Amino acid sequence: MTLGEDTLRRARELLAEHPVVDGHNDLPWALREQVGYDLDRRDVSQDLSAHLHTDLPRLRAGGVGAQFWSVYVRTDLAGDDAVSAVLEQVDVVRRLVERYPDDLALALTAREVEEARAAGRIASLMGAEGGHSINNSLATLRALYQLGVRYMTLTHNDNVPWADSATDEPAAGGLTRFGEEVVREMNRLGMLVDLSHVAASTMRDALRVSEAPVIFSHSSSRAVCDHPRNIPDDVLQLLADNGGVAMVTFVPKFVLPEAVEWSDRADAHLRSLGLHPLDGTERGVRARREFEEANPRPEATASTVADHLDHMRQVAGIDHLGIGGDYDGVPFTPADLGDVSCYPRLVGELLARGWSETDIGKVTWGNAVRVLGEAEGVARELSARRGPSIATLSQLDAPSAQNG
């Protein structure tokens, strides 16, 4: 569907009242890979469209009011190397906020998100992508919370010792006993449990254990596109009971069935060249471009993403939907959602489908802020009843503990 200027104008006006809380943007990792965190070489106050999906002018144009910056660590970094890398990611987010105080504000609570919006700044939150970044340590989890991390994705593309990933061979059968303790400690802290990337068994275990609303920071519907990174309908129903939010992602291979097989072939091509499928260096970008020129890819659109939102609204309800674009974390985007300036096109698509402004406002802003605040409320109650957990992986997941 081609959107008219009147529809796009209405979309921009709506976003001025109900800006986007985006659940996942990988700018910090892109800055690591492209320029080694040298912010002089990537001044995000300028147009960086030649290098990145994200910069401040395009965030403003896209109607973004709050951003969860992913403090992601690749899974080939393990142990203390993963912990060091996630600390570097946290550091660069804080440096960005300090460098651009007129545009960005560090936000640690739902109230601070609202205050940033009222002050005309983009609330900057952090989410750690992958439980390997805590190196099986609840004390490290708490340290990340103290540094401002407000969600943790339990796994990335590979299993952790205490939780199964969606894209690895099952090992734990969901969450182990220590994995359940991680969820409980996150609840006590007020850190959102993020179930993107995890296996469906892990999703169900976490929803059973969690006393606070959970999120999917960047996942879509498995019924619409059968990819393991997406959310099955029964889990969407459990999510509604939990009070959480599923933040639909724009990643073509997660939203367009025809793109799944093409992406598998593209990833295999990169591996044959000795490159990681998520390689963001110039060599990796060039290799993907060459593959695409020889093998034209099927293109997703805002309409493709809206199909997921239509279905997820039907299954989970309007109060449990959000947006998590995954910009700067993917090599390809939908044709008309090419960067962070493009959220009005998705909103315009929803308006054209007859979605009410009230419902769209819940998806863009209200639901995510509500969940953050509710998790804080649960944390206040839990922390009044119990102190920090000092449980360890070996204590809870030793064979004798499992059998006992």
Image (cartoon, rainbow, N blue to C red):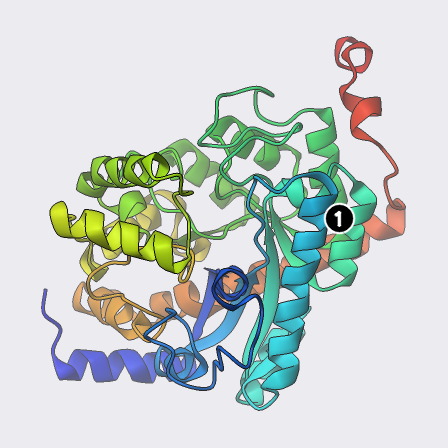
Q: Position of residue 283 (x, y in %)?
A: 36, 55
- The residue sitting at 27% across, 50% down in the picture is 288
In which quadrant of the rendered image does the C terminus lie? Answer: top right
Q: Position of residue 66 (x, y in %)?
A: 51, 73
Along the line of sight, the residue nearer the viewer: 239 or 342 = 342
Left or right: where 284 falls relative to 379: left
Residue receiving disc 1: 141
In the displayed structure, 270 sits above or below 58; it is above
In the displayed structure, 320 sits above or below 277; it is below
In the displayed structure, 310 sits above or below 97; it is above
- Can the viewer see residue 325 in this picture? no
Q: Position of residue 255 (x, y in %)?
A: 27, 47
Residue 395 falls in image quadrant: top right
Q: Position of residue 210 (x, y in %)?
A: 65, 40
Residue type for callout 1:
Leu
Left or right: where 75 falls relative to 209: left
- The residue sitting at 29% across, 34% down in the picture is 226
